Amino acid sequence: MSLQAYLHAFRLRWLAILLCAAIGLLAGAAVHFVVPPEYTAGTSIFVGSELSGDPSAAYQRSQLAEEQAQVYTEMATSARVRDQVAQQFGVADPNDLRITATNLPDSELVQIEVTDPSAATAAAMANATRDAVVGLVGRLDDTTPGPDQPAGVVARVVQPAEPPAAPSSLPVLATAGIGLLLGAAAGVVVALAQNASRRRVDSAAGLAEASGVPTLGVLGQVRGSRRAEPPELFAADGALADGARRLRNTVLVAGGGRSPQVIAVAGCRPGDGGSTTAVALARALGAAGRRVLLVEADLRNPSVGRLLGLDGGPDGLSGILAGGVRTAGTIRHRAGIDVLVAGAAAENPGDLLSRPHLRTVLDTLRSGYDQVVVDVPALLAYSDGGSIAPATDGIVVVCRCDHTTESDVRSAIGSVRDVGGRVLGTVLAMEPAGAAGRPHRTTVDSGPEWTEVVRPPQPSPGPQPSPGPQPARGSQSAAGPRTPSGLQG
């Protein structure tokens, strides 16, 4: 992973890192108050040589003193000394004694330290350890060497052990700081582990690599799209419309030698932008002069009507599939395209979409339109997509930028292929502004009517005939919606 990929993973999972750091901070502070304080007491022994006028003899005695200091150091932590001190202080296991002894290189000073929860006990144990060492190695004398000591070598107590006034354990700020660092490190590990197991698609190239199919287009995220009205969301000069035009061009060649005619559009999961992509693609196809029908096949959570500013009404696809409604009169015209809304809510939308009549309806609609765009429910949320996909020429899988995981992309595509459906490609939706190197913008149209109208070239200036009567505001175009002959009422 690159540095940018790491930073991106941390940005997406900053809350997990912050939570782990907070837990580590509290745990570190709790350790200070829960664990009893410890005290370390020490005593020092100097092993030196007697003064002598002979330089050669003085050097030899100095070498012997350094060797003797090493012997004191080794004996201080020996099992024999531990057993003696443990018996003296009633410690059951001699290995529980925390005794350390150090002798710096080329030094004749031996430092013995003992750590214990009691300051007085630590000092007493340090002195007892010193006495035990001296008793084993030789008699500690301030003036003359003992019988077991090398001639000319003396050992003196530099400083006896005293009860320490302050504990040697870390203060609360230190334990809390260590806990904070360890917690933050654990949070980073968790973030990287989550990123490895649930990597999210954040670019067209990454989506193509994860899906194994071409990325057909990228749709930018419109600021305030949740509150935007249809004219604002689908502004002709906005980033959404521009991405839809690019998507239109790639979809038309996605079928190889023949452009797909019935195109299904579905998100991986709810909220990935499947319905918005279907509307944007249908409008872009219509703006190119093609005869387009947008079918709202999401009977569970229909949103095409809302996006186009159309009332759902009782008549729609659900009534046609149930057999009680004919197509005549149910297809409506809006924004340069024909629209077949979902219709009345169905009690069993999954069973309704599984009926063979769905394929018959879609096959009949082919005769009246260049392209039929079908808005399909989220593939991983419901099984409806598996019923619709085989009846189409292919499906476009919509993935939400920085939200859809790579595993979800593969699962959604696999669910289509498992039922014999064809995947035309993927779309990366809701890409943040500026992520593709260009700003995402939208412009609000001035009027409430936003149906695209292609006007012929204006004649040269001159007397103009007076306009005839105008249709009422919101009425359908003069041509009206097309109804295939096979579905006439």
Image (spheres, rainbow, N blue to C red):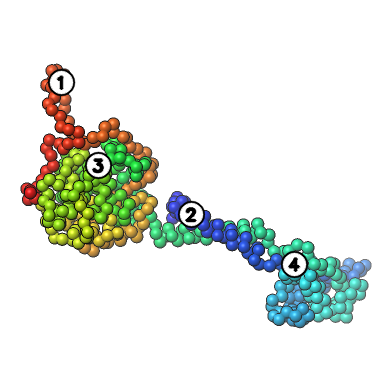
| Mark 2–mark 3 distance (CA, rounded to whole Å) | 38 Å
Using residue 362 as the reference point, say whether residue 198 is left or right of it.
Answer: right
Q: Which badge, 2 or 3, comes first in the chain's sequence?
A: 2
Q: CA distance from mark 3 to mark 1?
A: 37 Å
Query: Is the residue under label 1 in contact with that under label 3 (CB below 8 Å)?
Result: no
Separation of residues labelled 1 and 2 (CA atoms):
65 Å
Q: Furthest-top residue in view?
A: 462
Which of the numbered marks, if any, corresponds to residue 460?
1
**Residue under numbered circle 4:** 40
Q: Disc 1 and disc 4: Cα gap in Å?
A: 104 Å
Instruction: Please tell me which residue is depicted at 52% across the width and 55% down the height of the picture.
Output: 18
Q: Which residue is mark 2?
A: 15
In this picture, residue 424 sits left or right of residue 44: left
Q: Could you tell me the amino acid type at mark 2?
A: Leu
Looking at the rendered structure, the secondary structure element under dot 2 is helix
Task: Write down the quadrant of residue 336 in the picture.
Answer: top left
Q: Amino acid at mark 3?
A: Gly
Crowdedness of circle 1 by 10 Å Cα count: few (<14), some, many (20+)? few
Q: Mark 1 touching mark 4, by CB under 8 A?
A: no
Distance between the alpha carbons at the discs numbered 3 and 4 = 79 Å
Viewer-nearest of discs 2 and 3: 3
**For the residue carrying disc 4, how many other residues have a C-alpha within 10 Å: few (<14), some (14-19), or many (20+)?**
many
Front residue (pair 108, 295):
295
The x, y position of residue 480, in whole percent, is 13, 39
